[in-house]
Amino acid sequence: MTADLFENLDASAPIREQLAVGAVLLRGFARPRQHELVAAIQAITAQATFRRMFTPGGHQMSVAMTNCGEVGWVTDRSGYRYDAIDPDSGRPWPSMPPLLRDLAEQAAAEAGFAGFAPDACLINCYEPGAKMSLHQDRDERNMGAPIVSVSLGLPATFLFGGPKRSDKSQRYRLEHGDVVVWGGPARLAFHGVAPLADGEHGLLGRKRINLTFRRAR
Ligand code: SIN
Ligand code: FE2
């Protein structure tokens, strides 16, 4: 056994994997709060239901989305943007529960980005076959803040590359409770999710839910 494996046996030390300078995978970081998280997501989606949005090019996304927070990420024929109003309901997005905000803030601090104050949380729902093509998160005004991404439910293959689309990307398996944080020199890294393999998750059934926290404004 290596020293690393022994370190991971210490329950207080998160199991971390460095993806790039400024990018870290915190394995199982959200797991202790899994039940509260799922309940909070259910309460949000009861007010702002999942919907499959259209890209500016007119393609319907395979991932269903909703948001909570002061603003939410939306896409339609006129482009990508953050909006304080849910276009489906005409009402503000549900507010971000303190449980979610605290988790994002703590994961960011653990990754070296203390003081993260997210104002937006995009909630992605993947069913088997759903995917997200390689992209950068660049609709935020504040590139000084990191992105915090929480995975729940079925495992997924996460692709993480560099600042250019042509940079080679590495594949990581993201499981229930894993959190990825990227910021600083990795803030504009291309990333995506391979088509979700079918399966059955004990808590969420045949789906994967991903929460992506951002400082949009
Ligand atoms: C995203 O880039 O918005 C989603 C990433 C993920 O689902 O893990
Ligand atoms: Fe993204």
Image: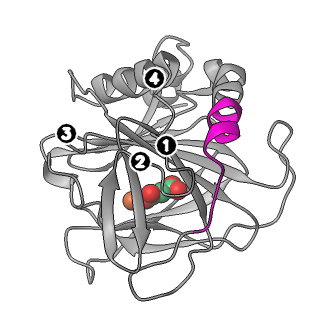
Q: Magenta region: which residues?
A: 41-52
- Tell me which corner region of the image, top left, top right, bottom left or bottom right, holds residue 25: top left
Residue at horizontal 72 percent and vertical 22 percent from the top: 35
Q: Nearer the viewer, mark 1 or mark 3?
A: 1
Mark number, residue 103: 4
State how far apart marks 3 and 4 are (Cα). 15 Å
Mark 2 or mark 1: which comes first in sequence? 2
Q: Position of residue 32 (x, y in %)?
A: 63, 18
- Dots 2 and 1: beta carbons under 8 Å? yes
Mark 3 or mark 2: which comes first in sequence? 2
Mark 3 or mark 4: which comes first in sequence? 4
Q: Amino acid type of disc 3?
A: Ala
- Dots 3 and 2: beta carbons under 8 Å? no
Please, what secondary structure does the residue beneath circle 2 have? loop
State how far apart marks 3 and 2 are (Cα). 23 Å
Mark 1 or mark 4: which comes first in sequence? 1
Q: Nearer the viewer, residue 106 or 140?
A: 140
The answer to whether 172 is drawn above or below residue 130 in the figure is: above
With 132 as the anchor, is 180 left or right in this view?
Answer: left
Residue at horizontal 82 percent and vertical 65 percent from the top: 198
- Dots 3 and 4: beta carbons under 8 Å? no
Residue at horizontal 28 percent and vertical 23 percent from the top: 109
Mark 2, residue position: 85
Mark 1 or mark 3: which comes first in sequence? 1
Mark number, residue 166: none
Mark 3, residue position: 145
Please, what secondary structure does the residue beneath circle 3 have? loop
Q: Position of residue 38 (x, y in %)?
A: 70, 30
Q: Position of residue 63 (x, y in %)?
A: 61, 66
Q: Amino acid type of disc 1?
A: Arg
Residue at horizontal 54 percent and vertical 69 percent from the top: 53
